[in-house]
Image: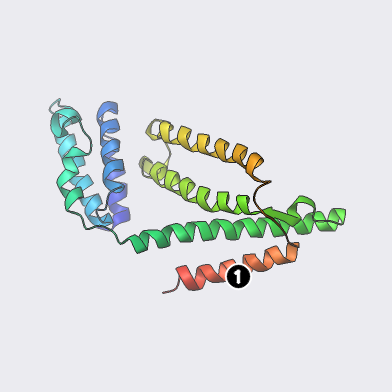
Amino acid sequence: MKVRDMIKENNRLREKMTPGNRSFFEDMILALRASQVDAVRTEELLLEAADKLLRAQDKGRTAQQIFGSDPEEYFREAIESAPTRPERGKARHYAMISWTALTLLFGMQGIAGLITLWSQGTAGPFGRISLFTMLAVGIGSIAGIELLMKWLSSLSEDDVPRIGGFNLKALGVYIGAVVAVVFAGLYFRQLFPVFTLSPWHYLLIFACGLIGLKFIFFRK
């Protein structure tokens, strides 16, 4: 069975759980999918745990009675014995996220600058970009993608998001970080250099970014 099929089967089994058991099991899912265990083994373990929980649920038992109070403890041995992912691969993943975000930033700046240039005769604010903005986008994109991946792992049957499965604490931390970056930008933008570029320069950088994505990150 492929990973995608196992995830769908897992989602189907979760729909049969009581609200309390499902909430506990979703914490188990988050813990295991965030670990170093490979994707195939992760879904196999989750299917085994889901089947075990449903059989126990039919007898009136709860997830805590089966797995203990800590959602991660049941998979502790598998998590600790999993080989560590190469740091180079993780760094490459984060670099790709930042590269993509900055490429899109330059693309949007170029398009907006052209529209403003044609309508007003000048690129206006789209003709300048701060180093702080580039750093904020590059770093912030990594945090955003990490939060998104955790959210996607909590989706229910038919890939429909459920508010109950969303990590509100993580969302609050992320929103707080965004607000902090915005206010920091208002203060630090005067301290960081600002680059003046024409819309065509932005689009040229955008094109180079796309080429870089293809030949650096997506090459076979």
Q: Quadrant of residue 88?
A: bottom left
Q: Identify the residue at horizontal 48%, vertical 46% (top origin).
A: 144
Image: 6 above or below 25: below
Q: Quadrant of the N terminus?
A: bottom left
Image: 106 above or below 9: below
Q: Identify the residue at horizontal 71%, vertical 66% (top origin).
A: 201
Kind of element beneath mark 1:
helix
Q: Identify the residue at horizontal 22%, vertical 54% (top origin).
A: 41
- 74 or 204: nearer the viewer: 204
- 131 or 34: nearer the viewer: 131
The residue where tag 1 is placed is 208
Residue lying farthest to the front in this orientation:
191
Image: 60 above or below 215: above
Q: Quadrant of the C terminus?
A: bottom left
Residue 4 location (% of width, % of height):
32, 54
Colour mapping: rainbow
Q: Identify the residue at horizontal 17%, vertical 44% (top origin).
A: 76
Answer left or right for 53 relative to 171: left
Crowd rating for badge 1 (residues with CA inside 10 Å; few <14, some 14–19, many 20+): few
Residue lying farthest to the right in this orientation:
121
Q: Amino acid at mark 1?
A: Cys
